[in-house]
Amino acid sequence: MRLPLPLLAATLVALPALAACTQNAASETTGSSGDGTVTVSSTDDACRLSSTEAPSGRLTFEVTNDGSQVTEFYLLDQDGKRIVGEVENIGPQLTRQLVVQAAPGTYTTACKPGMKGDGIRADFTVTDSGTKVETSADEQAMVEEAQEDYRAWVQQQSDLLVQRTRAFVEAYEAGDDRTAKALYPRARTPWERIETVAESFGDLDPRMDAREVDLEPGQEWTGWHRLEKDLWPARAEKYASLTQQQRKQYAEGLLANTVDLDKRIGGLTFTVDQIANGSRGLLEEVAKSKVSGEEEYWSRTDLYDFQANVDGARKALDVLTPLLRARDPQLLTTLQHRFDALQQLLDAQRSGDGFRSYDQLSQQQVHRLADAVNAVAEPLSRLTAAVIS
């Protein structure tokens, strides 16, 4: 079901394959380096960390893909369900960093070769270093304002997601496919703006946003893309439309999960490193499936998702701007200029109050968008380290 990929940069494109869920038997037990860095070697069948524990505070996972498949690395909470930090889309032989501000406690690490499944998991312990981060009163005020602004914005987007999903579901259930098609990309926009937050709920995300190509054996396909295929079946072979009963079942399931997500988001707070890592994560989402036209395989509405991911990444940068200006003004200037250049390319693809179909993009235009995403992603990878320095 995957698209024949255009001539994208290899580092932007993920080629999913099955990833085993096994324990990380190869982990070593030596301490982390003195600067709080833990090296990670992710291969096709192992996830080797230089340490299974580190002192609390700033912690850097330097993740090298020593395998043949694109991989991801996650730091999860103790029960392995909530994402504390992640770095995605690491191509073979590449090294990427995940920087977090880690409190004492027990965590789970996971490498995910092929970017599917639960990944290769192991326990990870953060001990109490006893060191307190000294922050000036002015900077503490910036931190608190950024946290509150981002929390309020995420809640606003979540509320909008419920509102638009309800309207979409009503049209779809009523058999008004024309209206449902018009509402589909707009209903998904708030989801894509806060995608890294929504994805952090490991039980809801696959029920709401799984693509057919990513399904695990035995996994029922539900959520946005199940309905997308039913509305745009032209590219499917021998597709049998859903019955009215099935439409009702999947549509109401999507709405129920959206309402559940909204309730859970209401209880969230965000640290500065989570906001910064979320911004980078949204650009990784663009690189992984939007710029390649894989996310919306049936509807070809990928540019709506693309814009929404950029919106979310830019919002995170905006709330962190006062803090970043105080700590690394050059990085701030670079990011603002590159986000502006990316936005200019996206604006060129607008049609009315929406976007052109992905199929209307030339290979040259896809290349330019991919290059612009890379140009933002590189300095954005340094954002977390800058704001928690």
Image: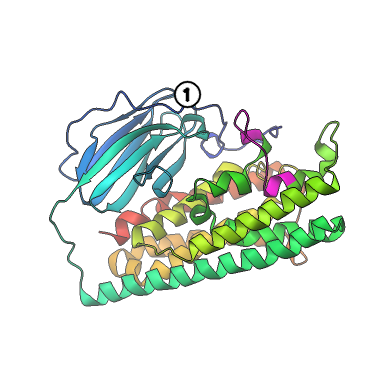
Left or right of 245: which side holds 137? Answer: left
Mark 1 element type: loop
Horizontal side of residue 244 vs 137, given as left or right:
right
User: Which sits in the foreground, 155 or 294?
Assistant: 155
Magenta highlight on residue 219: yes
Q: Nearer the viewer, residue 85 or 20?
A: 20
Q: Is residue 177 above or below residue 242?
A: below
Task: Classify 44 as above or below 201.
Answer: above
Q: Position of residue 91 (x, y in %)?
A: 47, 33
Task: From the top left corner, tell me how far across and down residue 204 is, in percent.
Answer: 55, 49
- Measured as percent of width and height from the top left, residue 297 is found at 72, 42
Relative depth, front residue between 134 and 74: 74
Residue at position x 55%, y 35% from top?
Answer: 14
Which residue is located at x 56 percent, y 48 percent?
205
In depth, the one of 253 and 310 nearer the eye is: 253
Quadrant (top left/top right/bottom left/bottom right) for the C terminus = bottom left
Tell me if 162 is positioned left or right of 73 in this view: right
Q: Is residue 299 visible?
A: no
Confirm whether the magenta stretch covers residue 279: no
Q: Position of residue 337 (x, y in %)?
A: 48, 63
* Mark 1 Cα shell of 10 Å, populated few (<14), some (14-19), many (≥20): some
Q: Quadrant of residue 233?
A: top right
Q: Which residues are magenta?
A: 213-226
Q: Amino acid at mark 1?
A: Ser
Residue at the extreme left of the image, as rendered: 130
Q: Which residue is mark 1?
A: 68
